[in-house]
């Protein structure tokens, strides 16, 4: 099932995809069906009682590491992001006026389903609630070291669109064989497959849970294949993952 979180009729609503529309599943409007273009799309993540941990992977596709002239890492290269960076489907990402290179990154995002600590790879899928699409923008002007991306590169407000759907794990039989594609203004600029990850999803869950607790609602962004290009104000970027969804985002110029 495809779950969504939307703003409609003056309130935040939980909904599911139903025959090309959104079916509201809770509250006084339960059972009401609304069109996709009638709502504001929010990140498809339910609120959590604790601070949400957002972990992102760098250089997790060998072709992307090669594209950047870096050796593929021997263990997961991870960094943290704040939840304030997350925005929803059809939202706007701000590009600072003074930067020279800002690029998208189409990524499979894993949503943790239950508390995970010292999980083995063989059991890792039991701890996943579902999957969504993330676009993990990077501003390369501020990059000091690909192995240590600083906050201005990767943790900026509006620079992590996510959605539109949270797809139940049970509906994604093999998350390690999904096609990824990015278009900029309708032109395909990136394509790949999750099969090409250096560290697959079970490996990542085993690795992170070996030294930290993963809580329900936490996110793991699993990296991107090669094919990055600079994005300018006005560009419409669609990051799409087979069976998960197509996430649309537009670049706008940031105010001074």
Image (cartoon, grey):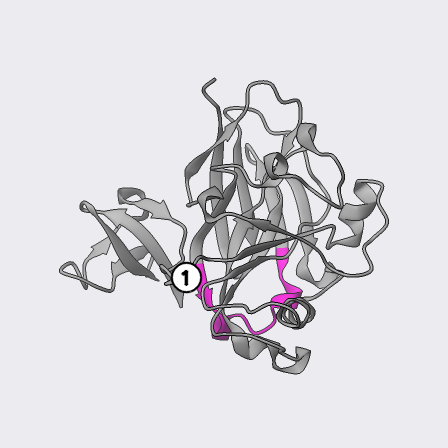
User: Relative to residue 105, is residue 93 drawn left or right?
Assistant: left
Compared with 49, 255 (above or below) is: above
Residue in front for this viewpoint, 122 or 246:
122
Q: Secondary structure at mark 1?
A: loop
- Classify residue 8 as left or right of residue 67: left
Residue assigned mark 1: 50
Note whether 121 is above or below 31 in the view shown: below
Q: What residue is rendered at 67% in x and 43% in y? A: 190
**Residue drawn at 56 percent across, 74 percent down:** 173
Is residue 18 a member of the stretch shown in magenta?
no
Q: Is residue 12 visible?
A: yes
Q: Report which quarter residue 198 is drawn in.
A: bottom right
Q: Would you place residue 200 above or below residue 20 in this image? A: below
- Quadrant in which the N terminus is drawn: bottom left
Binning the other alpha carbons within 10 Å of mark 1 as few (below 14), some (14 to 19) or many (20 upward) gives few
Residue 242 seen from this side = no
Marker count (numbered): 1
Q: Indicate the position of residue 12 as horizontal and vertical percent values.
A: 26, 51
Percent of width and height locating residue 204: 66, 66
Magenta part of the protein: which range? 166-179
Of 94 and 185, nearer the camera is 94
> Looking at the image, which is closer to me, 147 or 178?
147
Residue 22: x and y in percent read 29, 56
Residue at the image position 61 percent from the left and 71 percent from the top: 174
| Above or below: residue 103 compared with residue 28 | above
Q: How far across and how far down the image is residue 141, in percent?
A: 68, 27
Residue 173 magenta-highlighted: yes
Side of 127 where 99 appears, left or right: right
């Amino acid at each position: 099932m495809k779950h969504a979180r939307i703003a409609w009729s003056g309130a935040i609503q939980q909904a599911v995809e139903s025959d090309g529309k959104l079916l509201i599943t809770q509250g006084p409007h339960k059972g009401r069906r609304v069109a996709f273009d009638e709502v504001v799309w929010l990140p498809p993540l339910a609120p959590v009682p604790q601070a949400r941990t957002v972990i992102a992977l760098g250089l997790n596709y060998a072709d992307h590491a090669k594209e950047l002239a870096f050796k593929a890492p021997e263990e997961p290269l991870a960094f943290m992001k704040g939840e304030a960076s997350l925005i929803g489907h059809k939202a706007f990402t701000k590009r600072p006026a003074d930067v020279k290179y800002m690029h998208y990154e189409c990524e499979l995002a894993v949503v943790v389903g239950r508390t995970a600590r010292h999980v083995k790879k063989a059991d890792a899928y039991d701890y996943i609630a579902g999957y969504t699409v993330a676009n993990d923008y990077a501003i390369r002007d501020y990059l000091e070291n690909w192995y240590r991306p600083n906050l201005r590169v990767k943790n900026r407000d509006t620079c992590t669109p996510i959605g539109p759907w949270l797809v139940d794990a049970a509906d994604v039989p093999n998350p390690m064989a999904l096609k990824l594609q990015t278009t900029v203004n309708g032109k395909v600029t990136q394509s790949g497959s999750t099969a090409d990850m250096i560290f697959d999803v079970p490996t990542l869950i085993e690795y992170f849970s070996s030294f930290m607790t993963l809580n329900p609602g936490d996110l793991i962004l699993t990296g991107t294949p090669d094919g990055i290009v600079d994005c300018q104000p006005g560009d419409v970027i669609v990051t799409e993952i087979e069976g998960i969804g197509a996430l649309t985002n537009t670049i706008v110029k940031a105010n001074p």
